[in-house]
Image (spheres, rainbow, N blue to C red):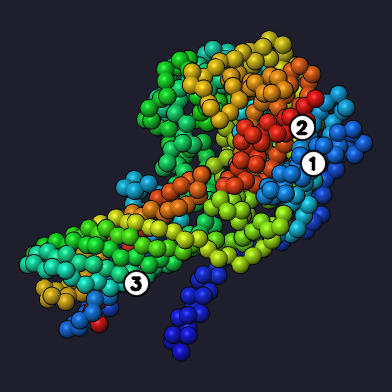
Amino acid sequence: MKKISLFFLFLCLLTACTKGEDIKPESYNCNYNFNDLSQVNPNNLVYQSVLDDMTSKGVVGVAMSVYSSNGIWLGASGKADLHNNIDMKSCNITRVGSIVKMVTATVILKLQEEGKLNIDDKISNYLNGDNINKIKNAEKATIRQLMQHSSGINNYIHSLQFQTASLNNLVKEWNAHELLKYSYNESPYFEPDEDVRYSNTGYILLGLLIEKLEGKPLYQVFDENIFEPLGLINTQFAGKNPVPEGIVRGYVDLYSNLNVIESTYYSGWDYYTADGGLISNVYDMNVFFRALMNGEIINANSLNQMLTWKTPKEVEVDFFPISYGLGIFKIETPKGIAYMHSGNAIGYDANMFYFPSDNTTIVYASNSNYGKIEPLVSSKQAMEKIINKTKE
Amino acid sequence: MNKYIAILLLAFSFPAILLGQEKGIPINISFFNESTAVPFTRFITTPIHPGIQLGTEFNYKVKEHSRLFQTANISYFYHNYLAQGIGLNTEFGYEYRLKFGLALQGLLGVGYMHTFATSDEFTFSNGQYIKKVDKGNSRFYPSLSLDLGYYLNKNKNSPKIFIRYQSWIEYPYSPGFIDIMSHVNIHIGTKIFI
């Protein structure tokens, strides 16, 4: 009898697993407040086939917006929620992670326009304490260098200690100071302005700067300065509500075998700091990017500063030739120069491109990543495929 | 936290005293906290991911103060949201026993582990995702452990209580993404003879 009990105890342990959350389908309902003409867009079938191709190979769900001379096209493929069997819709909200860096840079430039800072000031003129003293280069880096990733400040996200700690507690919600500690006393990549290299740590410092100058949490500054004036009703910073109703479920192929598990609640390092944590949909992001590029958010001088480029000394072989602006990148694609930013969280991935030659703007977002899904959503080949099919 | 470790060690010493007299086969039983961590950077981590290990050992060579030995163990851990695993391993160990009952051990191990998801898993099949029974993933897991123990008496078969720092590698983990995952288990356990 004891043996049988032990066997059942063991079986219980091995089958001890969290069941998916039951969510009413209505929670995912969303609409546009305009007449969506995507179905009559002359490229409708081509665009839809791009998304269907991705989901036929293992991407859980993907949504895309394409703005071109034919107007805006909006579409989706796959699932927003596997457990509840909900189809993905283009209006569904999702995590777009680091795309928030473009919002952060935009707000900083607006603050400069308002005379509240000068981007050539040192960040240490505004912040002090351990976050300046213990992060190498932080004392001498300027706000511009942080925005352009040319400060040389170490990127906390590459710390093995951070990576293992975040896996150890997947639902932990991290604050800025807990994250910055992983950059304390770490060697800088280079002296400020010598080169460019992506650093989330730099953007956390920029977020602290915004909060200090404005005396408000980041989500409120973003709402008041960017999202509300542009009418981006489906966009918010995660700090306001990390897992809002209607957000599509995220999935990860952690073991590279197209067996996915849900990860909706696993991006807690991304909720409160200005290096990630944006929640939006592909329509709102398309509107934001075009408004920014058309000078509707910041003035021409600020936009010129944002679009002043630095090229890394080391060429990235698996990506397009790239240059770094202020919270934005310039890449050379087969269809010409594009400005872009990417973002991801655990189980989420997003990319957006703006082609200055004709204002074509493409945004796509997937609710799955890692493993075998990664090359389908965020590789150079994946981006090239989408650009080639959507840019005329 | 140290207070709790002391209480646990004390609690472990009672079965050791009761069961450890004049018997032959050594049994090691320990409860542990598993964590994903870089070795030798953290000791106690939270949240607690519980695990249990049961094993035995035999000696290759015994001297007055030291011995070389081999262990065989079965273990289970549950890491919330990430994985649960059952492992079989063996370790080659060296122990140095001090006069006043303290003993230091180093253990080098290899093992096989089968891990399972702790949440619903969806498998891509015929162009769509379907919920399937998780068959788990095979893992190789080498380990390195350092152990501080206390023998309750001077007998050869004295029961022992111990605290162990076990660092182990999970391979393969996520091919092409995170190839190797590093874990640390902090064990509190006892050796008894039956």
Q: Which residue, given by chain and number where applicable, does mark 2 sit on?
A: A389
**What secondary structure is marked by label 3?**
strand
Q: Which residue, given by chain and number where applicable, does mark 3 sit on?
A: B54
Disc 1 crowd rating (10 Å Cα; few below 14, some 14-19, many 20+) is some
Disc 2 marks a residue whose amino acid type is Lys
- Between tags 1 and 3, which lies in front? 1
Q: Is residue B122 left or right of residue A201?
A: right
The percent coordinates of residue A84 (x first, y second) are 74, 59
Q: Using the rendered image, report if marks 1 and 2 lie on a common chain.
A: yes
In the rendered structure, the residue with mark 3 lies on which chain?
A: B
- Relative to residue B70, is residue A141 depicted above or below? above
Q: Is residue A237 visible?
A: no
The percent coordinates of residue A310 (x first, y second) are 56, 15
- Relative to residue B123, is residue A76 depicted above or below? above
Q: Which residue, given by chain and number where applicable, does mark 1 sit on?
A: A49
Q: For the C terminus of chain A, which image quadrant?
A: top right
- Relative to residue A58, is residue A309 depicted above or below? above
**Real-space Cα distance between discs 3 and 2?**
58 Å
